[in-house]
Image (spheres, helix red, strand yellow):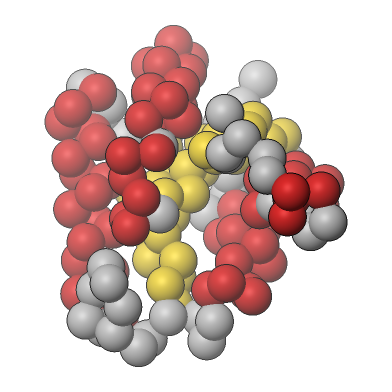
């Protein structure tokens, strides 16, 4: 089966992640798997954090909150800082899965809009290019 779950999280849109977070927690509990929550941001101030150290702290706190909320015993969190998350996000997530030894990525998606028929969504890109299994939760 699987040995570790990675869950990408967008701290600016936590309200849209609930189904993916619950799915990851349920699978983690069912198979007694560790979960790694991964956040990606830039080093410049944003609407989420004022800098990379604050963002790293927020991702760590988010992981701890998820562990408590879903009664998970083995949770880690990793923050990745890149120049432009809107451009680099997909590749950073693939790198994060590799570096964190995840063999299952569970990520949230949205209902596709017109732009998604022209440009690949993050979930679509990660699922198409990942070496590990990807569960996209809509």
Residue 103: give x, y in percent of width and height. Answer: 64, 38
From the viewer's perspective, is 79 left or right of 131?
left
| Residue 113 occupies quadrant | top right
30 in relation to 9, above or below:
above
Residue 58: give x, y in percent of width and height. Answer: 21, 61
Residue 81: give x, y in percent of width and height. Answer: 44, 77
52 in relation to 114, above or below:
below
Closest to the observer, 138 or 118: 118
Q: Residue furthest front?
A: 114
From the viewer's perspective, is 36 left or right of 133?
left
Residue at figure coordinates x 18%, y 40% from the top left: 65
Residue 87: give x, y in percent of width and height. Answer: 64, 75
59 in relation to 114, above or below:
below
Residue at figure coordinates x 52%, y 54% from the top left: 100
Residue at figure coordinates x 63%, y 74% from the top left: 88
Q: Quadrant of the N terminus?
A: top right
| Residue 41 occupies quadrant | bottom left
Residue at figure coordinates x 53%, y 73% from the top left: 85
Closest to the observer, 99 or 7: 7
Q: Is residue 104 visible?
A: no
| Residue 47 occupies quadrant | bottom left
Closest to the observer, 13 or 59: 13
29 in relation to 61, above or below:
above
Q: Residue furthest top?
A: 30
Q: Is residue 109 visible?
A: yes
Q: Quadrant of the C terminus?
A: top right
Number of marks in the image? 0
């Amino acid at each position: 089966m699987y040995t570790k779950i990675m869950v990408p999280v967008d701290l600016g849109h936590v309200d849209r992640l609930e189904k993916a977070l619950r799915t990851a927690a349920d699978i983690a509990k069912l198979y007694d798997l560790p979960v790694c929550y991964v956040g990606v941001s830039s080093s410049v101030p944003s609407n989420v954090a004022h800098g990379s150290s604050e963002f790293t702290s927020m991702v760590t706190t988010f992981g701890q909150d998820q562990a408590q909320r879903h009664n998970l015993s083995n949770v880690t969190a990793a923050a990745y800082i890149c120049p432009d998350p809107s451009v680099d996000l997909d590749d950073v997530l693939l790198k994060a899965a590799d570096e964190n030894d995840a063999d299952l990525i569970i990520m949230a998606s949205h209902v596709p809009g017109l732009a998604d028929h022209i440009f690949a969504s993050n979930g679509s890109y990660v699922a198409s290019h990942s070496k590990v299994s990807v569960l996209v939760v809509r």
